[in-house]
Every structure is written in C-alpha cells, then in structure tokens.
C-alpha cells in the first residue's frame, strides 16, 4: 500500500469519537492565507471585471487602491498557494480508484458513498480542485504580470497584453467557479470544515469519506486502546 | 523684403533658396501655404539638405553650400538662351541698355582693377559711359556689345547646365526642371517670389548671392509686382529694425552713412552725396539726403545744432576704417587694443565665428558689461563647463557686470518685421526681479556719464553734454516718446516750397512724413524712413485694422510700413511703361492719366508721368541695375567663387578660388583648411532648427523638451564610411576647433558629386550652449572660419570644412 | 484659408456641452440625449505640415504639462514617444517613394483620434472615467480614472499613457475645455500653416476634399482622407498624400478596429463569466436542497473506533 496518502502530521487518536489529525497548524495557516487572498482577489478582480460590480472597489478604498492592491494580493496568493502545492501535491496524485469514483459521480452527488471505492486522503473532486487551482493560479500570475503595467509595461506588446487580459479574465472566472465548488463541498460534506479550523476530523468522517487513508493511518497505530479523552 | 509676408500669398512660384522658411520662419511660411492653397502656386526648394521646407515642396534639388551663384547665373543663362525674358520690363525698367566704360572686363575670375596687396579693386572702369549731356549713354536696341545686357550675356555664358552640375552637385535634370519652372515666370501674368535668409548672407560672397537672384527677378519682371520681389527673411523679429535705425558701425539711422575721417567737415561730407540723376527727369530721391541728415543732427543735438556749427556735424564720430563690425571688434580685443565691451542683447561667444578667438578676446578685456534678459554664455565665458567651455577661470581677470533687462513681452514698443512693418506691441507681463528696460538702463548710464563730464570735464565732452534728452522723466524715457522722436517734428513752421504762404506743419507738431523734413534746421527726425510712424494721427504702428480691399494682401490699415506705409517697394514697376498693370488680375497701382493710384501707396511721385519717370526712384538712373557699377566691392556682376574652405578647386575660375576682396585678417588666414583638403574632407554648414530660437529658447523648458540635445546631421553614406551609429556620439573638428555631438543619420542629406568628386555634407545646428535648461552642448562657432562677406562683413557660417569620427562618451 | 479660430473673449462663458451631452460613458449604461450636438473634428493635413512642433508646445502649455528634457537618439522625434505629458507628438518618417525615387519626409502629428467607437472607453472598467460627448469628443475624467491601463489595451492606435506619477491615464482631450467655450484646440490655434484645422466634421470633410483635389493636381494620385470606418470614423482625421498606404506614416494603422480580443473580453467573457460563476453557486444551492447535507453517521464513527482499536470491522 502506498504511503502517498499520508501527509506529515496526519495522525489518528483513539477515543470516542476517534479523532484524526488531517491538517497541521502550518497547513491551516497556509490555507487560510490562500483562502483570504483568493477571496480578496475575487472581490477586487470582479470589481474591475464587470461594471455592475465596480462598487466592490469601495471595500478596498476606491478604484485606485483596488487597482494597486490586486496584483500584490496576487503575489501573496501565488506564493501562499505554492506552499500548499508543496504540501499537498503528492497526496493529490491520480489513483486508479479516482477513476472509478469519477465514473460513479452520480452516487457521489446523491451521497451513496457506500457504492464508491475506498479513497485515500483526497477524492477525485478534491484533486480536481487542487490541480485546476494550481493550473489556474499559474495562468493568473503569468497573465497578471503581463498586465501589471506599473512594473512590467515595457516587457510585452499591447497585443500580448490584450491576450493576457482576456486569459486572465477567463482563468479568474474558472478559479472562482472552482472555489465555489470547493467551498460548497466543504459545507455540504458536514464535518469537513473543522479539518481546516481545528485541524482534525472525526474518525467517522474519515471512515465515511477517506477510508483508505484512515486504514493507512490506523495501520500505523500501536496496538492497545487509545488513552485519548473523548471529544465532546 | 521688397514685398511683405502677406503678399507672398499672391505668388505663382515660391523659390526657397538660401533659407529654410518653414524651419526658421514657420509663422511667415503660412503665406506660402496660402499661395499653394489659393493660387495653386508651386514651391521649389534648393538646399544642401532636404529641409522642413522641402518636406512640403513640389520640387526639391540639392546644392552644395556656397554654389548658389553658379546655380542662379545658370538659370539666368537658361532664361536668356531660351528667350524667357520679360522684355518690356527689362528694356524699360533696368539698365540693360546702358553702355559700360571700355576697359571693364572679367577675366580669370577677376574684374578689371584688382590690387592683390590691398585685396581691393580700383573700380573706376565699373561705370557707365557718360555722354556730353552729363547723362549715361544708352542703346535701347541692345545691340551695342558694350551694353549691360550683352556684357551680362557673356558673363553668364559659362554657367551651362553641365557647369552648374559640376559646381553645385545638382543633377542636371533637376536643375533644368527648376530652370524651366522659373523661366515660366517671365510671363507678365506669372510671378515668382524669392525667399531667402542667412543661407545666402552668411558667405564670403553673401551680398552677391542675393544680387544674382535680384538680377534674375528683374529679368523675369518680378520686382515691384504682387507676389514677386526679393524677400529677405530676417533672422530676428526686429533685425530689420536694427538695420533701419542704423545699428551698424558705419551707419546712422535710415541707411545714411556715418562720416569717415576723410570727410572733415559738413561740406566735404555732402559733396559726395549729391545724387544727381543719371538720366533726364529722374527722381533720384537721395537728392533729399541733406534734409534727412540735418533733421537727424537736430534730433541728436537739438538747439545746440545750428546752421552756424553745421548742425554739430563735428560731434558725430568719424570712421578711420570702413567698419567697426564685430569681427573687427574682436580682432581689436584680441590685439589688446579694445579693453572694455558693452554687450546689449547679444551673445557673441555663441554667435561669432572661431569661438576660441572670441573666448580669448573676452579674457583680455578689463571689463565686460552684459545687458540681457537671459543668463548668456558670454556673461559666463569665464566659467568652466567641461569640454564645452574649457577655460581656466583663475587665469581670466575680466570683470563682468550683468545688467538683467526685460524681454520684448515685458515692454511696450515696436518691432519691425521682414516686410518693413513697424508693429507696436504692449507689455504682456511684468519683468522679474531686478530686470529693467533697456531704455531705463541706457538713460541712467547717460545721465550718470553726463554728470561726470559736467563735474570733472574730459576730452570731447560736447557730444555727451549737448545730446538732446527731451524726455518727461529723463531717467526713464517711454517708448512713445522715443517713437515720436524717431517720427520727427517741426521745430519751426514748415511751409510748402511751391507756395510759401501755405503752412504744411505748425511748429511743435509731429511731421506727417519725411516729405516735410527740411535741411535748414526747422525739423528734427530720428530716422527719416520711419517718419510717419507716430504722427499727429497717432501711433500708426498700433493700428490693427484688417481691412484689405479686394484681398490684395496689402492691409494698409494694419500697423505702419516704411516708407510712408508702402507695402511693396518699386510698385510703380507693377505697371508697364504706360502705367497699365502688367497683370490686370494683380493690379497694384495704375496711372489714370493724371495720377498714380491703387491698392498701395505709390512708390513714385503721384503725378510723375509714366513715360518720363522711372520706377526705381532711389537710383539716379531711375531704373534698376543688372550691372551695379562700383557699388559693390566684389564686382558689378556676381561671379562664382568657392567658400574660403571648400572641398573642390573652383571649377569656373581655378586661378581665383575665393572672393578676392572678402574680409579676412592676416592671422586668421593661417587657420583655413586648403581647398580639397584630405585632413578636413567634409563640407559643413550651420543652421537653425524650428524648435529653437537662437540661444534664447534653450532657457525654456518646452523648447528644450522638443529638441533637447546638440547633434550633427550626416548622410547614411557618410555614417557608413566613418562607421557612425544613429544616435551615437561623434567628434567633429575643423582647423579651428572641435565639438562633440550626437549623430543624426538621415536620408535627407546625400553626398553630392561636385567636379567628379563625392562631397559629403555635415549639418550642424546652432542652438546649444552651457546655460539654460536644455542639455549642455557645443555650437558650430567652435568650428567656423573668421572670414566675412566683402560688402557687409557677415561671417561665412554656411560653408566650411570639417572631419568627423565616432567617439565613446558617457551619456549625461 | 480656413477661417482662423477666433481669439477668446475675456468675458465669462457658459460651456456649450457637459455631462448632459454624453453619448457614451465607460462602464455605465446611459440614456443619450435626444438631440446630438454637431459632430466636431480636427483635420490634420499632413501634406501642409512642416513639423515645427508648435502643436506640441501649445499642448504642453495649454494643459500645463511638464515633460522631461530628454536626449537625442538620432532622430527629430522628441520626446521619443507619447507620454502622460506629451499628448501629441510629431513623428517623422523618411520615405523614398519607389515610383519617383524622391525622398519624402512624412511628418505626422500623432495623438488621440477620438474614435466614434472608442476602444479605450469600451475597455475602461471605471464608471465615467472615459466619456464621449455627443459632439464626438472622447474625454478622460481623471478623478474617476483608476489607472488600470485597460484603455491602453482597448485603443487601436496605441495612444493612452498612464502617468507614473499620478497613475492616471492621459491622452489628448481635443481641448474639450476650450471647445466648450467656443475655442478650437490649442494645437490648431498654434499651427502656423493651418495644417491643423478644427470645425464640424462635415466642414472638415469638405475642406479635406479641396485639399485632396489640390494634392491630386500635384501628382499625388492616392491622396485621400483618413477617417477609418473600422472604428466608426474618427473625430481627428488626416489628409494623406498616400492614403492607400497609411502605415508609411510612422505606422498609422491601415484598417484600425477595436481588437477582437478586446471585444471578446469586454463582450461575451463579461457575461459568460458571471454566468459560469452564478451557475456554480446555483448548482451548489440546488444540490443542497435536493441532496441535503452529507452527514457522518454514528455507524461511521463506530466503525472508525473499531478500526482504531484494532478490531476487525465487518460490514
């Protein structure tokens, strides 16, 4: 059995319920920086994307500051996400069961997880979010630099900037859409959000959604009952 | 200008040669645009460079700088050969028929009478045969081989299209195309205007360049007519005014001469100024010289000028040399003979040739006073500015005083434009800081000097103590007061000489015009030609009425043109011998059987009968001169001479390379490169750019932005030859100095083939120095030779030899 | 001669157009005025231009702009490009006419063309930062500009520049402040040869016809008016001696139009993008309604506990 699915810091604690450490403190901070910058980028970006949303510039102190701050947040996002990428890329490698999972997407959406194969730390949906975000952020930072006129105006032609601005807009729309899926999935699948707040999930959550990962962690447990206190 | 700026719109053909109107006179150039738009006029530009004027021309031809006479005499030859002559005009209004003295000849590049030692001519044979009746002998059939016309024909015969190409480098086909277009204007209903400027004057034969074109214009019948004329585009907005009021070392106002030391008294002075007519019945208007001269003396010395003391003639300075022009002034400084220099509105360190000599000369002065609105290079000649002004301040003892003055827009007064219009202007702003009007500064100086003379006495104090100073506030004369003084007034009652009972001007009144001036001391006039500018009708220079009946372009109610508000000089010549307009559609004045009248103030006595009185009333002949007698130092006809520094041996007269009587000082002669020099193989020329005005506007940020840095222009061919890169640094040097510049490599300059040899041209604009806001830079005067025109001493800025090489230099 | 622009009166004047006369406003939906003002235009006759740069000087002076004193790089064009302070620039091209072998010095005054369909305005995200008056003038409102540079990408003529100091876009305003009080643009006023004239667009077209006829009579068979239809015509037009080859005039675009990329960006992408985002959000909402939350059951927890305790789990 491959250990790809287990990331540093993942651990299982016996108890009632069982508590499974899913994200380290570092990973959570990293995630929330990424999340915050992505939200800010979406808000400031949308403000400049559609006139009807221009009012959003008010959140940033007006159009000039919105225009000024957006690319800098983009830089934060890029490096922050790069941190996540380094943490998560391995566990997000494609597995055979991901194909099966995808093929039974109807069961996924209807919550019939018993009909799905056992999964590692991430399911195909999460992997899709991870990889598409990785790709889109790369596109966004690249096209963003091309249209960051304050510092990079002279390095590209206007025609290249036109392409960049279009690509940037499309990539941003896709990124926001992926983000919506990501957030919705976290809400829909109850018990998920605590993974990024407290860093852990219940054993039942892991059993239900990422049983293979849970088994791998359990396999690493020393025998004997857990001394851990129950979670409330 | 014989005509006016506004009249240029009446022309059929504009020839810009020896100038670059679009570049240096963009506002006046609008009238060329008007002529093109309204009359379908064509524009010809002949210039070593494809200029901004050429950019909007119909035909452009290149020419080697300093070869204009060959070109123009070539065109004259073409016109004569092809019978493109306005015969009626030439026969009636020029001296073509006058018989020239035996003995006058032109051979090997020299006219009769040359004295090599004196570098001067004995001009006694350069004159008409005078008959027993005291008048010049004429042969109206033009058959006499000694008549001016036949001498001219012979004189120009050498300037074939092939010779023109050899001398000028102008391709023969281009030359012929232009000659043909010009020749068309020999028709009485087609006119050509000549627009020229310093591209003709700044040569060792500058005056003759202009004469050559004037002769061509006479042959075509284009002088005195609408849309014709010889139109000098003056380089400063008031340089016309400068010459008019006699700011020359040998002149007094109104083109009268300062006496020489040989003219020891008033009678001796007047003796050579009789201006007796050379043909019967002619006006010879200079016969009134005495009236103007006496009136001038009255304006100078007022009541102290009396008939008894010959109107204080003795107090006028007397010249011991022909001129004390700037070239001589600096020569004297250099020799240590002139130790103080008063520099008003002038920047000789930038303007005069051989900058090293100028700088050395200023360093030898005891004191230098600079009156200028700007911080000029001359005022700071002692300041080291890297290689641009490479002097050692520790070794310069000259005391420099800077007197900041107002600029034109901070003062009331008049400016005289190229078309002789005196246009009044009003102060548009107040002067900064301590800047004072020039009149205030001069008045204060005068009063203090007068006081010193009064208290301490001194040699020859009379001219200063008795100088008329009639201003309400003696310390601050107003522009109006000076204008009225220039206009002139009656000191006593002026009566009509034909009818002594009739009073023309009451005592104390301003004279209506110079016709009222008298030689008995009853009138005073500062500058006779300006008389009428501010008379009892008021300040005529301030008139701003744009009425122009029948759109002739005269605008008689706008400002005041000298003389007597006449807009086109010699306008009598716009009508034929019988007084009918040559071109009815371009009528100017006509004879109605009793008098002359029309759109302009007639340039002839109003009742002078057309068949009797010639139109060129200032000339004793009454006609114009194709042959100028002894009135020019370098010959009665122009002849091609090479510039003193030339890439070729004179193809026309190899034995006489350059103007034999041009002004040179012995010391400077050593500093010339040899003809065809290999050390200095390239023909350089200097010029202005439209973005700047001389050395003034480099003090203005906007102008500095538009043309920030000194450069030289070269052809792509020369750049390839010398491996010079576009925008790279180059060094350009002549036998007198060296400059560092950016290289503008352009298709607008092409090498010319002259006498079988490729001549590369280096163009050097002149606007940079080391004061102001533009980048510090050199000027062409570090390179130019110290040689002046034979007649008017203008330095030869337009043609000299240099070498050029690429250099490394850090970007400033 | 075209009638000169009158000298200004010293009396106070009421502007003849203003916010009520807008026909286009960036990032806004507006109702244009019922009556459109007479369309104005500036006509630049390249064949009459002597390249004196008086227009450039007048532009700097009237608009109170301070440009850097640059260097010479081997050409007459100074500054070397349009900047946030140089709103108009003479561009010099030395062109040898292959038909006559004569050199022609083509001097074109570059600057905003005031397109009838302005690409800058289309691209601008800030409401009201770019406006078009019903007389055709396209103007930037600096107070509303956010400095994003989208106008630079929208413009088919490469005109707007972003100031590095104020971070605002700048371009020729056609001197809308002067035009509003009955004056012509400062450049036209300063032009000594009337190569720049200003008036109603119809007048300018008529004037151009005369000029073109004159040029044709002088041998310029392809003389013509540059009023490119790709951008709906412009309110700055050129008379060119070689109207068939506008690109020889320092790269004047042959058939300019708003870039299809910009059209796509500001058109379909804008709507499709929001639709995609909205669809994603709606999908989640609807899914949640139908499928309800995906909860962990007690059985799951028990199974996990058993697993953790090392007991074999049986289904």
Image (cartoon, coloured by chain):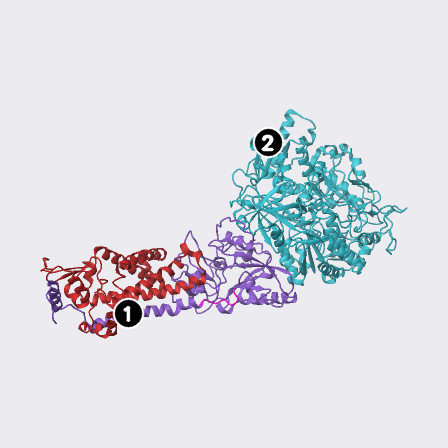
Chain colours: A red, B cyan, C purple
The image shows residue B60 at horizontal and vertical percentages of 67, 58
According to the picture, the residue beneath numbered tag 2 turns out to be: B398
- Please report, as a chain letter, where disc 1 is located: C
Q: For the residue carrying disc 1, how many other residues have a C-alpha within 10 Å: few (<14), some (14-19), or many (20+)?
A: some
Q: In the figure, B168 relative to B340: above or below?
A: below
In this picture, is B271 found above or below B280? Answer: above
Whether residue B572 is visible: no
Left or right, residue C305 beside residue B773: left
Residue farthest toward the front in the current orientation of the protein: A1
Query: Within the image, what quadrant is residue C1 found in?
Result: bottom right
Nearer the observer: mark 2 or 1; the answer is 1
Report, in whole angstroms, how far the alpha carbon at label 2 lies from the one at label 1: 87 Å
Identify the magenta region. C253-259
- Residue C148 in magenta? no
Q: Position of residue C209 (x, y in %)?
A: 59, 67
Q: Secondary structure at mark 2?
A: loop
Front-most of residues C304 and B490? C304
- Residue C175 visible in the current orientation: yes
Residue that carries the numbered disc 1 in the rendered image: C280
Per the image, label 1 sits on a secondary structure element best described as helix
């Amino acid at each position: 059995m491959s250990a790809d699915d287990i990331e540093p810091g993942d651990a299982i604690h016996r108890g009632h319920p069982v508590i499974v450490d899913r994200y380290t403190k570092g990973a959570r901070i990293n995630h929330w920086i990424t999340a915050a910058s992505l939200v800010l980028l979406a808000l400031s970006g949308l403000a400049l994307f559609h006139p009807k949303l221009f009012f959003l510039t008010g959140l940033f102190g007006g159009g000039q500051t919105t225009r000024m701050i957006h690319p800098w947040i983009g830089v934060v996002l890029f490096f922050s996400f790069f941190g996540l990428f380094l943490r998560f890329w391995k566990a997000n490698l494609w597995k055979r069961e991901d194909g099966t999972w995808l093929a039974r997407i109807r069961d996924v959406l209807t919550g019939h997880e018993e009909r799905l194969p056992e999964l590692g730390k991430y399911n195909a949906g999460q992997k899709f979010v991870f990889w598409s975000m990785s790709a889109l952020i790369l596109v966004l930072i690249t096209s963003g630099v091309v249209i960051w006129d304050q510092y990079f105006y002279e390095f590209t032609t206007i025609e290249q900037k036109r392409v960049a601005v279009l690509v940037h807009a499309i990539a941003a729309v896709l990124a926001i859409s992926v983000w919506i899926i990501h957030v919705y999935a976290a809400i829909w699948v109850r018990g998920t959000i605590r993974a990024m707040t407290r860093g852990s999930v219940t054993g039942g959550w892991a059993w239900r959604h990422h049983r293979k990962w849970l088994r791998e962690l359990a396999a690493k447990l020393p025998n004997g009952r857990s001394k851990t206190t129950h979670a409330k | 200008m014989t005509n006016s700026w506004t009249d240029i719109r009446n022309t059929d053909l504009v020839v810009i040669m020896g100038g670059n109107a679009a570049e240096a006179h963009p506002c006046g150039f609008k009238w060329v645009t008007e002529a093109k738009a309204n009359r379908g006029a064509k524009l010809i530009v002949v210039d070593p460079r494809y200029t901004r004027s050429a950019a909007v021309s119909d035909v452009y031809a290149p020419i080697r700088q300093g070869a204009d006479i060959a070109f123009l005499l070539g065109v004259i030859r073409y016109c004569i050969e092809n019978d493109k002559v306005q015969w009626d005009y030439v026969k009636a209004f020029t001296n073509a028929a006058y018989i020239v003295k035996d003995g006058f000849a032109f051979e090997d590049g020299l006219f009769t009478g040359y004295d090599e030692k004196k570098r001067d001519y004995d001009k006694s044979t350069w004159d008409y045969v005078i008959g027993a009746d005291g008048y010049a002998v004429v042969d109206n059939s033009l058959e006499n081989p000694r008549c001016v016309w036949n001498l001219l024909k012979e004189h120009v015969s050498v300037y074939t299209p092939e010779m023109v190409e050899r001398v000028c480098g102008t391709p023969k086909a281009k030359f012929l195309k232009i000659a043909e277009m010009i020749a068309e204007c020999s028709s009485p209903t087609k006119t050509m205007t000549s627009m020229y400027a310093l591209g003709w004057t700044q040569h060792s034969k500058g005056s003759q360049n202009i004469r050559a074109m004037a002769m061509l214009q006479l042959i075509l019948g284009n002088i005195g007519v609408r849309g014709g004329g010889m139109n000098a585009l003056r380089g400063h907005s008031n340089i016309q005014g400068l010459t008019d009021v006699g700011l020359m070392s040998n002149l007094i106002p109104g083109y009268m001469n300062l006496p020489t030391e040989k003219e020891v008294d008033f009678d001796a002075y007047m003796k050579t100024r009789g201006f007796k007519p050379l043909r019967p019945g002619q006006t010879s208007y200079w016969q009134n010289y005495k009236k103007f001269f006496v009136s001038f003396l009255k304006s100078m010395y007022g009541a102290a000028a009396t008939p008894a003391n010959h109107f204080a003639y003795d107090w006028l300075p007397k010249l011991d040399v022909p001129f004390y022009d700037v070239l001589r002034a600096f020569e004297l400084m250099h020799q240590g003979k002139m130790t103080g220099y008063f520099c008003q509105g002038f920047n000789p360190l930038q303007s005069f040739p051989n900058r090293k000599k100028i700088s050395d000369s200023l360093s030898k002065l005891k004191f230098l006073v600079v009156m200028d609105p700007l911080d000029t290079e001359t005022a700071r000649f002692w300041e080291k500015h890297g290689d641009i002004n490479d002097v050692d301040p520790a070794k310069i003892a000259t005391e420099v005083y800077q007197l900041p003055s107002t600029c034109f827009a901070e003062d009331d007064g008049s400016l005289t434009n190229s078309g002789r219009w005196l246009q009044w202007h009003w102060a548009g702003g107040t002067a900064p800081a301590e800047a004072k009007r020039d009149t205030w500064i001069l008045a204060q100086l005068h009063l203090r000097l007068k006081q010193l003379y009064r208290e301490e006495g001194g040699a020859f104090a009379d001219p200063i103590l008795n100088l008329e100073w009639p201003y309400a506030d003696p310390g601050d004369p107003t522009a109006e007061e000076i204008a009225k003084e220039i206009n002139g007034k009656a000191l006593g009652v002026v009566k009509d000489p034909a009818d002594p009972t009739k009073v023309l001007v009451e005592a104390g009144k301003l004279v209506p015009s110079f016709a009222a001036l008298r030689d008995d001391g009853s009138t005073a006039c500062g500058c006779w030609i300006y008389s009428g500018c501010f008379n009892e009708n008021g300040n005529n220079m301030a008139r701003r009425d744009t009425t122009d009946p029948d759109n002739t372009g005269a605008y008689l109610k706008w400002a005041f043109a000298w003389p007597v508000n006449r807009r086109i000089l010699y306008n009598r010549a716009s009508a034929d011998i019988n007084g009918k307009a040559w071109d009815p559609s371009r009528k100017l004045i006509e004879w109605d059987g009793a008098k002359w009248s029309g759109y302009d103030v007639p340039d002839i006595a109003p009742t002078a009968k057309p068949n009797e009185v010639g139109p060129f009333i200032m000339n004793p002949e009454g006609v114009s001169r194709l042959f100028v007698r002894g009135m020019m130092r370098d010959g009665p006809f122009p002849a091609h001479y090479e510039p003193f520094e030339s890439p070729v041996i004179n193809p026309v007269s190899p034995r006489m390379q350059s103007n034999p009587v041009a002004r040179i000082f012995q010391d400077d002669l050593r500093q010339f490169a040899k003809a065809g020099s290999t050390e200095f193989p390239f023909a350089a020329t200097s010029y202005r750019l439209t973005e700047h005005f001389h050395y003034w506007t480099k003090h203005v940020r906007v102008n500095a932005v538009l043309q920030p840095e000194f450069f030289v222009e070269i052809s792509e061919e020369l750049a390839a030859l010398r491996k010079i890169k576009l925008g790279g640094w180059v060094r350009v040097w002549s036998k007198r100095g060296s400059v560092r510049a950016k290289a503008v490599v352009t298709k607008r300059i092409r090498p010319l083939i002259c006498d079988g040899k490729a001549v590369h041209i280096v163009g050097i604009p002149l606007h940079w120095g080391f004061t102001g806001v533009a980048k510090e830079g050199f000027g062409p005067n570090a390179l130019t030779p110290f040689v002046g025109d034979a007649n008017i001493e203008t330095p030869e800025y337009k043609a000299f030899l240099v070498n050029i090489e690429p250099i490394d230099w850090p970007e400033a | 001669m075209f009638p000169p622009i009158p000298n200004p009166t010293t009396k106070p004047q009421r502007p003849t157009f203003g916010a009520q006369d807008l026909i286009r406003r960036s990032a806004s939906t507006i109702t244009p005025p019922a009556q459109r003002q007479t369309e104005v235009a500036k006509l630049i006759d390249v064949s009459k231009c002597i390249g004196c740069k008086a227009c450039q000087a007048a532009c700097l002076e009237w608009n109170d702009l301070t440009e850097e004193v640059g260097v010479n790089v081997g050409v007459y064009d100074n500054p070397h490009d349009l900047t946030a302070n140089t709103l108009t620039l003479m561009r010099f091209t030395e062109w040898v006419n292959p038909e006559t072998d004569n050199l022609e010095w083509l001097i074109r005054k570059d600057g905003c063309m005031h397109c009838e369909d302005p690409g800058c305005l289309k691209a601008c995200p800030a409401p009201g930062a770019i406006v078009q008056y019903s007389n055709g003038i396209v103007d930037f409102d600096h107070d509303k500009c956010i400095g994003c540079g989208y106008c630079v990408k929208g413009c088919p003529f490469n005109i707007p520049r972003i100031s590095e100091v104020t971070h605002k876009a700048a371009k020729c305003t056609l001197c809308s402040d002067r035009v509003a009080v009955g004056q012509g643009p400062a450049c036209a006023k300063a032009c000594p040869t009337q190569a720049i004239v200003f008036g109603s667009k119809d007048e300018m077209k008529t004037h151009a016809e005369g000029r073109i006829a004159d040029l044709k009579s002088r041998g310029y068979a392809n003389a013509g008016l540059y009023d490119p239809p790709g951008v709906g015509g412009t309110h700055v037009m050129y008379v060119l001696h070689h109207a068939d080859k506008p690109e020889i005039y320092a790269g004047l675009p042959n058939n300019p139009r708003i870039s299809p990329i910009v059209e796509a960006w500001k058109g379909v992408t804008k709507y499709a993008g929001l639709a995609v985002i909205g669809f994603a959000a709606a999908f989640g909402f609807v899914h949640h309604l139908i499928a309800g939350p995906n909860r962990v059951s007690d059985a799951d927890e028990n199974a996990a506990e058993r697993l953790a305790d090392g007991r074999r789990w049986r289904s």
